[in-house]
Amino acid sequence: MRPDSLNPLFVDSESLDGVGPKLRKPLEKLGLTRVKDIAYHLPDRFVQRRAVANLDEASVGEQIVVALTPTDHRASAGRGPFRIVAQDAAGNLCTLTYFGRASYTARKQLPLGETRWVAGKLDQYGQMLQIVHPDHVEVESSALMGKLNEAVYPLAEGLTQPRVAGLVAQALGHVPELAEWIEPGLVARMHWPTWRDALELAHRDMHPAARDRLAYDELLANSLALMLVKNANRARRGQALKGDGRLREKLALPFPLTGAQQRSIGEIEGDLVQASPMLRLLQGDVGAGKTVVALEAMLIAVEAGAQAAMLAPTEILARQHFETLRKLAAPTGVNVALLTGRDKGKARESLLMGLVDGSIDILVGTHAIFQDTVSYRNLALVVIDEQHRFGVGQRLMLAQKGKVTPHCLAMTATPIPRTLTLAQYGEMEVSRLDEMPPGRQPIDTRVVAQERLGDVAAAIARHIATGQQAYWVCPMVRESENDDLAAAEARYAALRERFGDAVVLVHGQLKPDAKDAAMERFASGDAKLLVATTVIEVGVDVPNATLMVIEQAERFGLAQLHQLRGRVGRGSEKSVCLLLRGEHLSETGKERLALMRETQDGFRLAEEDLRLRGGGELLGTRQSGDTPFRIASLEQIQKLLPMAHDDARLLIERDGGLGSARGEAARLLLYLFERDWGVQLLRGG
Ligand code: ADP
Ligand code: MG
């Protein structure tokens, strides 16, 4: 239950004055649905303005506040701008220019012959000084003197700066004083303001200490929550699994395991014999061979008389894992089954029976495998593939499934920079597959201008003629999923004209049957070219596909490009990846694509991605997908996370139940950042 003192912060934004249905959408778009979100909606930057007596004192390009008296209103014909000629105290002329509907308000705000205080950026248009769309027009100078240093907020369509500033001011009025949750010595050493002051200061000017403090709060909340998970897990009763090796012995893998695979399996085996449930992350680059490691782990569970389940983020992937595992496990005689949301009726019934009576040893599926209606005879190990798709909350839900808490092996190919591993997986032990299976050929990566689309199609034709297959990944259009879809459909139609039936299309909104059918045709080699949105990003394994085209590659993050590229280079044939780039490429954009060409080391790419994105940039959780933070920038994460981690550890060591005064404050913090699953664990839930 959330402490009462926080309630005002969690009230709907609509409770603020002036927020009606019209503002709902833009606010939602910015993630500002509650008062707390608005209070935390920090400015991107600040405009610094100078008040000048007349325009002689100002220079072009400067942000100023000046008194002007309109002498002429000039409407232009058609769609041209509305211009107001105005005079300063020294007799200099200046044009105030308005486009579109803004001219109506301007006409009223700036009547002829009456002096007004105007704030804006001074420009020059031909011989004439001008201010385009002044930021403020006021009757009294005092109204602008408080805006010499003004916050600039991230906006969405339908919102203006003054609107947002007004909402922020209201929201700040609801911010309560809260007890300090940070270690007092640290607060003093860093010269950090209190939480409430920090929020106010961060809206008032670029106040690094205030910003850092707010970021630190978020990092501390995260570290604390993860540590509580770890602690609670340690206290849980699991099932010690000791395999006798009889099934693993029968596996007839077509290749020897790499050293890294053997080591990871050893680490997992060591966890499984413990009674406290395993929480281990298996981190390994695309193609490093995580599936086999998972299989060995699941066989240990079966040898010990229990069941194992493997969770995949998509149906395509679940199906593919099922096929792979069934084939690999065939010599062992274990019973592998597949369950997805689509299974209905009799088939589903008998499958559920098999889980209850224990005749199914290993179940593969989507999140359907954890529905309430699914029960197991003795589920002792859960493997989660492509872990980054699931949040900690979901991980915890799985833990509730068995009578005893199942062991958990999470797998991810996302090469997480070291700084972020702690943030994301602080509660887990980590095994790394840092060695690729032998015999992999490097992928020949080239950057090609989008105009050469014709040449690219010709290259595909030649490629297909040799009997090999190819992927074509369509651009990621950030604005909307529908645009992505439209781009993929259009490309598919164009490629079909050339390659006919040999092309298939897969995207997230296809009906599952159609998606499967398309994937099936591609996997079987019947279809030669797979056009796709980023749904193929994770896991799909077709070794004969050795060419990948990625359109508008500059729009993708390095980590994502790396994941995509990992779909090729899986067999012994040489693979090629063509990164098509648009016309206007920033310096950073160029550098990123060059890096893709240069290296295939996922960790290096992740670190460089972090560096190139640079400091100071605020990350939205959704946009980046690779940090769980809204407030803390990458730079702040690097600087402050180790401190937050230590702080959290010390607090938990001293006061694991969070019962002391500071512990109580820390609970508030967990609720504030919605890491309250951490608190719930404290109650032994
Ligand atoms: P990922 O780590 O991306 O999940 P997979 O488990 O799909 O990788 O493995 C990629 C490919 O490498 C598969 O075709 C798999 O059979 C193969 N593979 C796995 N381990 C080895 C190994 N030790 N030697 C050779 N090939 C291997
Ligand atoms: Mg995989």
Image (cartoon, helix red, strand yellow):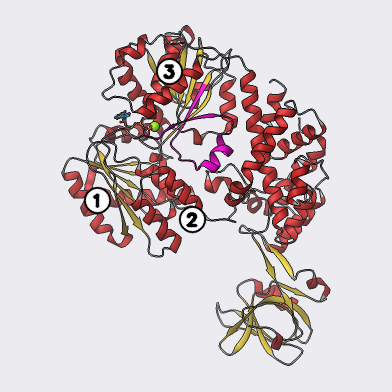
Which of the two discs, 2 and 1, labels the residue nearer the N terminus? Answer: 1
Q: How many marks?
A: 3
Q: Residue at x 25, y 32 (%)?
A: 524
Nearest to the observer: residue 445 or residue 125: 445
CB atoms of marks 3 and 1 within 8 Å: no
Nearest to the observer: residue 190 or residue 543: 190
Point out the image quarter for the N terminus. Answer: top right
Task: Determine whether the beta carbon of the residue marked 3 sits less than 8 angstroms from the nearest atom of ligand 1.
Answer: no
Could you say which quadrant of the image residue 75 lies in? bottom right
What is the magenta range?
408-435
**Rendering coords of residue 192 (x, y %):** 75, 51
Query: Magenta stretch: residue 414 in it?
Result: yes
Q: Which residue is mark 3?
A: 298
**Rendering coords of residue 342 (x, y %):** 44, 25
Nearest to the observer: residue 564 or residue 457: 564
Which of the two discs, 3 and 1, labels the residue nearer the N terminus? Answer: 3
**Rendering coords of residue 289 (x, y %):** 36, 30
Q: Residue at x 64, y 59 (%)?
A: 44
The image shows residue 145, relative to residue 350, as above or below, that is below
Q: Which residue is mark 2?
A: 612
